[in-house]
Amino acid sequence: MNKERWNKLLEEMKADGLDGLVLVPGPNLYYMTGLRMGLSERPSLCAIEAFGAATFLMPGFEITKGENLAATLLDQGVEMEFRMESFSDEEGPGPAFARVFQGKGGTWGLEYTSARMLEYSLMKKAMGDFAFVDAGTIMKKLRMIKDQSEIRAMETA
C-alpha cells in the first residue's frame, strides 16, 4: 500500500515539475506515513524531494517517531532514502531547517490549508526565494482513487 502511494507521489511531483513537497502534521502526512501528530509550537514536517529522499524534521523529543516510521515504511517496501533532522529547544528550529533546505530551491509544494507561516518563513530563510505551489492539488489526486486497503476499510465500516 504505502509503496504505491510513495511511487505515485514521486510521479506526480515530477510531472508537475516539483523539486520537493512538504507535508505537515495532518491528514496528508497521515495518508503517506501513518503518523498521527498535531501541529504544535515546534514545527514538524516531512520534506520529500523528487529524486527519492524524505527528511523527517522534528523536535528532538519526537525524532524516535520519525525513526520508527522510516523503519516501518522501508519494511513495507517504500523505496525512499529516509533522513532524520532534529532540533532542541535551546537551538530552535532555524538551524535544522537550514540543514534540510539550504542550497535547495526550485519549486516546492506546500499545503496551503495546513502549512503555517512558521514553516514557510523557516524554509525561506534557509533557501532564499523559492517558487511554491499548493501541494493539496497533488494530494487530492492521490487520495481520490482508493487503494485496496482503503476499500477494505470502507467495506468494514
Image (cartoon, helix red, strand yellow):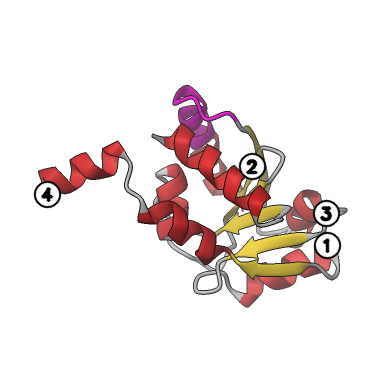
The numbered disc on residue 104 is: 3
Location of residue 87 in the rendering, given as x and y in whole percent from the top left corner: 68, 52
The amino acid marked with disc number 1 is Met
Mark 1 lies on a secondary structure that is helix
The residue identified by callout 4 is 157
Figure quadrant of the N terminus = top left
Q: Earlier in the sequence, mark 2 or mark 3?
A: 2
Do labels 2 and 4 touch, CB within 8 Å?
Answer: no
Q: Which is in the foreground here, disc 2 or disc 4?
A: 4
Distance in Å between CA atoms under marks 1 and 3: 6 Å
Q: Earlier in the sequence, mark 1 or mark 2?
A: 2
Do labels 1 and 3 touch, CB within 8 Å?
Answer: yes
Side of 90 relative to 151 (left or right): right
Mark 4, other Cα within 10 Å: few <14 / some 14–19 / many ≥20: few
- Is residue 126 shown above or below 76? below
The residue identified by callout 1 is 127
Mark 3, other Cα within 10 Å: few <14 / some 14–19 / many ≥20: some
Going 65% across and 69% down the picture, which residue do you hit? Answer: 133
The residue identified by callout 2 is 54
Q: Earlier in the sequence, mark 3 or mark 4?
A: 3
Q: Depth check: 33 or 132 in front?
A: 132
